[in-house]
Structures are given as C-alpha cells and as structure tokens.
Image: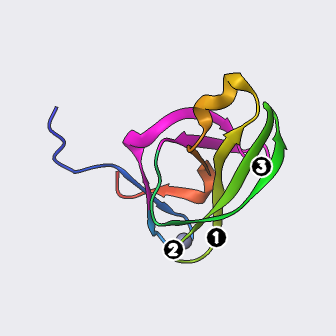
C-alpha cells in the first residue's frame, strides 16, 4: 500500500502549523470541552504543553495539561498526564485535539 501523496497531516485551523498525523489517531470518538467532537492521538507535534492540573472529565478525574499550537498559541486540546481510574490508564501521555481546531492538509 504505497502512499504517493505522503503522510496525511492535520494543521492548526488558525495558522496551518502541522500538529498531527492522521495515522496517529487512536480514536475519533472523543468529546471536546464544548461537547464538540474530538480525536485522541498517540502523538502530536509542534505544540506547547501547559501546566498540569486535575480536571474532572466525563469519564472521571484526570491530571491533564492544555496543548496549544507552538506557532499561534491557540489552545487545540489537552494531554492526559495521569488517569486516576485504572481503566482509563491507556490515555496517559496521549493527546486530545478538538476536531474543529484542526484541518486536513490537502487530502
Ligand atoms: Zn496555530
């Protein structure tokens, strides 16, 4: 399965800074902070990770850090630093990006 067009990239919706690869999506079934759709990524790039804080989300209590674009500073989502619930541990070190804050780069 050769991919002539190269890896499928997502860019920041504000400045088009490349922030993630489509292949790094773990799940498309996440809910963002305003109940909008969001994706869980195993890896993101060109982002700045903010201070860690505990936050109560739909599935429980987590220690998270906001993730923002390294170019324009727009907050794009958050990173799971620690999950306090055993069943949610797989999310640790993964990052949620809000779907409306990322755009497909020419694909
Ligand atoms: Zn940006």
Residue drawn at the location 61% of the way across and 35% of the way down: 91
Q: Please identify, in this view, whether the residue under mark 2 or under mark 1 is nearer the observer.
A: 1
Question: Mark 2 or mark 1, which has the lower sequence index?
Answer: 2
Q: Considering only vertical position in the picture, is 29 above or below 71?
A: above
* Main SS of residues in magenta: strand
Magenta-drawn stretch contains 64? no
Say which residue label 3 marks. 33
Label 2: element kind: loop
Local crowd size for mark 3, using a 10 Å CA cut-off: few (<14), some (14–19), many (≥20): few
Q: Residue at x 51, y 74 (%)?
A: 15
Q: Is mark 2 within 8 Å of ligand 1?
A: yes
Label 3 – label 2 distance at C-alpha: 21 Å
Residue 29 colored magenta? yes
Which residue appears at 68% of the width and 59% of the height?
Answer: 66
> Marks 2 and 1, how far apart in space?
9 Å
Q: Residue at x 21, y 50 (%)?
A: 5
Direction from residue 7 to residue 58 in the image, left or right? right
Q: Is ligand 1 closer than 8 angstroms to the Cβ of mark 3?
A: no
Callout 2–callout 1 Cβ contact below 8 Å: yes
Q: Which of pointers 3 and 2 indicates the residue nearer the eye? A: 3
CA gap, disc 1 and disc 3: 14 Å
User: Which residue in the protein does label 1 denote?
Assistant: 74
Tag 3's secondary structure?
loop
- Residue in the foreground of this view, choosing between 45 and 87: 87
Q: Which residues are magenta?
A: 19-42
Measured from the top left, where is residue 36 in percent x and y?
Answer: 72, 45
Question: Does the closest atom of ligand 1 sit within 8 Å of the Cβ of label 1?
Answer: yes
Q: Give the labeled residue for mark 2.
A: 15
- Point out residue 2 in the picture as x, y percentages from the top left corner: 14, 37
């Amino acid at each position: 399965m050769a991919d002539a067009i190269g890896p499928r990239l997502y860019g920041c919706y504000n400045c088009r800074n490349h922030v993630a690869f489509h292949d790094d999506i773990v799940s498309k079934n996440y809910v963002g902070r305003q109940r909008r759709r969001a994706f869980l990524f195993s890896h993101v790039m060109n982002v700045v990770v903010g201070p860690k804080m505990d936050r109560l989300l739909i599935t429980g209590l987590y220690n998270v850090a906001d993730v923002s674009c390294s170019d324009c500073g727009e907050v794009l989502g958050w990173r799971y630093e620690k999950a306090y619930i055993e069943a949610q541990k797989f999310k640790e070190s993964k990052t949620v990006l809000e779907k409306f804050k990322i755009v497909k780069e020419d694909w």
